[in-house]
Image (tube, helix red, strand yellow):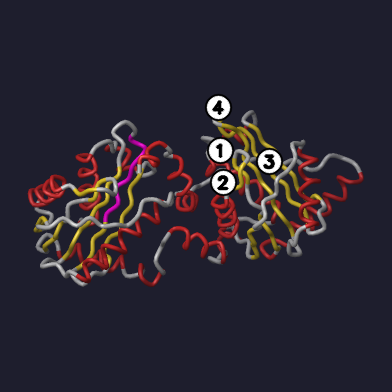
Amino acid sequence: MKKLLSTPNRFRAARMGLVLLAAGAGVLPLAGAPQAGPEAEAQQKRLELMKSKGPDLTLTILPVRLAGQSWDRVTEVVGLLLEQQGLKNIELGKKPFEPPATNLGGLAAAAGLFVKSNSIPNGYALYAEFNGNRQTGLNEMRAVVVDSDGAAVWTDRLTAEDDAFKKAGNAEPLTLAVLLIERLKPQFGLDAATAKAAKPGKMAAIADERSGLPPADERSALPDLQQAMRKAMPGATLLVYPPRIDGATTSVSSGSNVVRSLNQAGSCKAVLAQEPVLLKASLADPNELKALWGIATEFRDYVRAHPPAADYALYADYFFNSQHADQGFVHWVVCDRKGDWVVVDMQNSHNRDYQNIGIISRDRCDQLLLRRLEGYLK
C-alpha cells in the first residue's frame, strides 16, 4: 500500500481512460509536409491515399514507448481515442519495436523495416514515443506512420520548445496522448463528423475490461434507482458502515461522524452498522476505476447475503496521504435493501469537490463523502 503513496502517477496513468474520454483538446498546428524531392512527392501521394480511406483504413498501433519503455496501457488509450474519433479497424501490435538512436528519418526507416519483417495486417502501422527522463520530465514526442510495405507515410516530432507542445499543458502521458491524436486526426481523414458517427468497438471493450466496469446492462438502472432514492428521502433509512481506511482497517469514528451529520441535516434517517465490515477488494492494481468497481461488487454481494434492516446501505473506501492532497481517493457505494447498486461514486484529485476540500485526513474524507451524498439526495 505504501508503494501507492510514493508513486502517485501510477494512479494517474491508470485513470487515463476516463480522463481522456472527457478531455477537450484545442486545435493544434498540423505536422509539416515532407521536404521537397522525389521521395517527398511519393510520400505525399501515400499520405493523400491514406487520408482518402478515412475511418475505414486499417491501423496497427505498435507499442507506445514512454521514457524508453513500452507501455501497453498507453497504447490502448491511443487506440481508444482514435476509435472515438471514428477509426473502425484498429489492431494493437504485440511485439515491441525497439528503435535505434536516430533522427526522425532514421526512425521512420527503422519502423518500416520492422513492419516488413513482422506480420502487420495490410494497411498502416503507427509508432509513437514520448521521451524524457526523471530529471527533465517528458520533453519530446515523435511519431511515424508507415504502410504495410514499410514505406514512410507521415512523420512528426515536437519538443518542449514547440508551441503545440506548450499549449498541450503539463507534459504527462495523458496530455501527450491527446496531443498525438490531434496531430493524427487530419492525417487519417478524421473530423467532427466521423467522431459523431463513431461507435464503441474493440478498443472500448479492452478499456472496459481494464477498468473493471461491469456490463452496461448492470449499470443502466442506476439513474432510475437514484431518482427513487431522492423521492424516498428524507424519510428512508440509511445504514452506514464504518468506512474502510487504506484498505487495511475500518473507522467507527468516521461512520459515527457521517451518521450524526446526516441526521443533523435531516437528509435521511441514518443508522450506524453495529458490526464493521472490512471488505477485501484489492488496491494492488494501479487502475483506480477497477478498485472502485471491485469494492462496489463486493459490497453488493455482501448486502445480498446480509439484507439490511434499512432501505439503503452505504459503504465508503478512503485512501489519503496527509502530506500530499493529490494522492488519495474517496470511493463509496449505496445499495438498496435488495443489494442493487444505487450510487457508485469515485472522487480523486481530478474532481472539483475533492480539490476544494483537500483530502489529507480521515475527517476531510468524511466531509467529501457527505458533500457528494447530499448532491445525490437533493
Q: Which residues are magenta?
A: 325-332
Classify 212 as above or below 216: above
Q: CA distance from mark 1 to mark 4?
A: 20 Å
Q: CA distance from mark 2 to mark 1?
A: 8 Å
Which of the two discs, 1 and 3, sits closer to the camera? Answer: 3
Which of the two discs, 3 and 2, sits closer to the camera? Answer: 3
Q: Look at label 1 and name its amino acid.
A: Ala
User: Could you tell me residue 263's position as x and y percent?
Assistant: 8, 52
Pointers 3 and 4 in contact (CB under 8 A)?
no
Drawn side of residue 240 relative to residue 358, left or right: left
Dot 2: element = helix
Q: CA distance from mark 2 to mark 4?
A: 23 Å
- The answer to which of 120 and 218 lies nearer the viewer is 120
Residue marked by disc 1: 168
Residue lying at 63% horizontally and 59% vertically, measured from the top left: 92
Q: CA distance from mark 1 to mark 3?
A: 15 Å
Drawn side of residue 2 relative to residue 276, left or right: right
Q: Residues within 10 Å of mark 1 (few under 14, many from 20)?
A: some
Q: Quadrant of residue 343?
A: bottom left
Q: Residues within 10 Å of mark 3 (few under 14, many from 20)?
A: some
Residue marked by disc 3: 142
Q: Residue 135 got which mark? A: 4
Which of the two discs, 2 and 4, sits closer to the camera? Answer: 4
Mark sitting earlier along the chain (3/4): 4
Q: Quadrant of the N terminus?
A: top left
- The answer to which of 17 and 371 lies nearer the viewer is 17
Q: CA distance from mark 3 to mark 4?
A: 19 Å
User: Could you tell me residue 296's position as x and y percent?
Assistant: 30, 61
Q: CA distance from mark 3 to mark 2?
A: 14 Å
Q: Look at label 4 and name its amino acid.
A: Gln
Residue lying at 19% horizontally and 40% vertically, measured from the top left: 363
Mark sitting earlier along the chain (3/2): 3
